[in-house]
Amino acid sequence: MSLSIRNQLPGTVTAIATGEVMATVKVRLGSGQEVTAAITLDSVKDLGLAEGSQVRALVKSTEVSLATGPVTGLSIRNQIPGTVVEVATGGAMAGVKVAVDGGELTAAITADAVSDLGLAAGTPVVALIKSTEVSLATV
């Protein structure tokens, strides 16, 4: 199956915490960075997820925010450091490609945000992704 989701990071499930309806699934990426996905318990069962399962963490580019440094006092669990490699700016929106250990992320943000943050190739950034915006696919 082909997907329009550009952000697809391979990893291994390291832990699953289940509730009545939802579960949090921790995934260790190839770089050692850990990402948390909040998915339904039905999805955990349907995908057959368990510790050691190989998965891909999927995130739409519109769900990736960027900061110019680590952020504290924030509920967003997934903070992935990287470096901007490309900025494609249009009239209102921009696509920012970020090299991260083990892969690349694309963030769709406003052109104003690119300007305000001074983003350009070589800028260190932190990609911020809410756990509820991370989907998982088995490989």
Image (cartoon, rainbow, N blue to C red):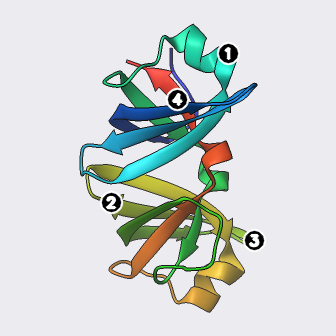
What's the CA distance linking mark 4 and mark 3? 30 Å
| Quarter of the image where one finds residue 50 | top left
Q: Residue at x 26, y 49 (%)?
A: 102
Give the mark nearest the N terminus, 4 or 1: 1
Q: Say if mark 4 contacts mark 3, CB within 8 Å.
A: no
What's the CA distance linking mark 4 and mark 1? 13 Å
> Residue 36 in the image: x percent, y percent?
51, 46
Give the mark nearest the N terminus, 3 or 2: 3
Residue labelled with disc 1? 42
The quarter of the image holding the C terminus is top left
Q: Give the class, few, some or many, for how many residues have Cα within 10 Å of label 2's Cα (few <14, many ≥20).
A: some
> Residue 27 in the image: x percent, y percent?
40, 39
User: Label for residue 92?
Assistant: 3
- Secondary element under disc 1, as helix, strand or loop, is helix
Residue 9 vertical position relative to residue 127 in the rendered view, above or below? above
Q: Nearer the viewer, mark 3 or mark 2?
A: 2
Residue 26 vertical position relative to residue 102 in the rendered view, above or below? above
Give the mark nearest the N terminus, 4 or 3: 3
What's the CA distance linking mark 2 and mark 1? 31 Å
Q: Say if mark 4 contacts mark 1, CB within 8 Å.
A: no
Q: Residue at x 46, y 83 (%)?
A: 69
> Residue 44 in the image: x percent, y percent?
57, 19
Q: Give the class, few, some or many, for how many residues have Cα within 10 Å of label 4's Cα (few <14, many ≥20).
A: many
Residue labelled with disc 4? 136
Q: Residue at x 47, y 79 (%)?
A: 70
What's the CA distance linking mark 4 and mark 2? 19 Å
Check disc 3 and give the amino acid type. Answer: Ala
Q: Residue at x 49, y 83 (%)?
A: 68
Q: Nearer the viewer, mark 2 or mark 1?
A: 1
Residue labelled with disc 2? 100
| Quarter of the image where one finds residue 129 | bottom right
Check disc 4 and give the amino acid type. Answer: Leu
